[in-house]
Amino acid sequence: SYEPTQPPSVSVSPGQTASITCSGEKLGDKFVCWYQQKPGQSPVLVIYQNNKRPSGIPERFSGSNSGNTATLTISGTQAMDEADYYCQSWDNKLFGGGTKLTVL
Amino acid sequence: EVQLVESGGGLAQPGGSLRLSCAASGFTFSDYWMGWVRQAPGKGLQWVANINKDGSEKYDVDSVRGRFTISRDNAKTSLYLEMSTLRAEDTAVYFCARESMAGSGIDYWGQGALVTVSS
């Protein structure tokens, strides 16, 4: 099994939409979850089962998964969303390499 | 309030051993799969191992197989990771993790325990 592939970095302007992709063979057939990690902190689950938000996660976070690509979308991105984001394919538990989201 | 508190991290020599513990509270421990995730300094997350509710099923990543053993004590609401034949590349922060009851995702993480393997 190979870990999913993420872009190392994504930049977005405040208030705009950020999209972070996670690619892998037939990833759309599997559940994908997403985590946010800020410097010096433990990760936080922001999306599970492809598109579900845990309680307390803002509605601007959404997810989708189809074909070979899962996508985390942050609408109306805020400065507080600047962080590293990791996808995880739940069937084999492998994490993507992570994407650093910069809000500038 | 759910709490996961790791202990047992520290400095170990290459080829040495170390045992991590995770004390869980604030939820019914025996109702959840549990696991360990690690993060090398400045690197990404790596899933290490997980264990089912009663400890009868265990899974781990190839790079630790045969060297690391995950276990749990439901009476003590504790999770363990026994690490042996340690290598420099095992140096990382090790997070204790609770898997979501929905069956997809880690919904609670500990604060992490640093393991440094160096001579």
Image (cartoon, coloured by chain):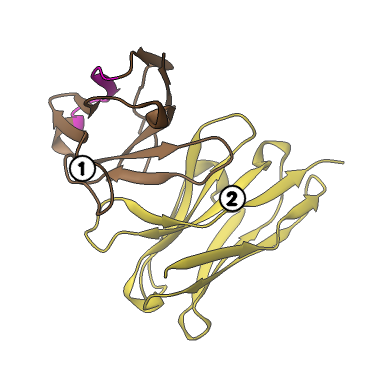
Q: Amino acid at mark 1?
A: Phe
Q: Residue at x 30, y 43 (%)?
A: A46
Q: Is residue A37 magenta?
A: no
Q: Quadrant of residue A17?
A: top left
Chain name for mark 1: A
Q: Residue at x 54, y 50 (%)?
A: B65
Q: CA–CA distance between discs 1 and 2? A: 24 Å
- Which quadrant is the C terminus of chain A positioned in? top left
- Which quadrant is the N terminus of chain A positioned in? top left
Classify A98 as above or below B72: above
The disc placed on residue B94 is: 2
- Residue A92 seen in the figure: no
- Residue A80 seen in the figure: yes
Residue A23, given in percent of the width and then of the height, sits at 27, 23
* Chain letter for the part of the structure drawn in yellow: B
B109 relative position to A67: left or right: right
Q: Amino acid at mark 2?
A: Tyr
Q: Which residues are magenta?
A: A15-27
Classify A60 as above or below B9: above
Q: Mark 1 sits on what residue?
A: A31
A26 relative position to B80: left or right: left
Proximity of marks 1 and 2: CB atoms separated by less than 8 Å: no
A8 relative position to A47: left or right: right
* Chain letter for the part of the structure drawn in brown: A
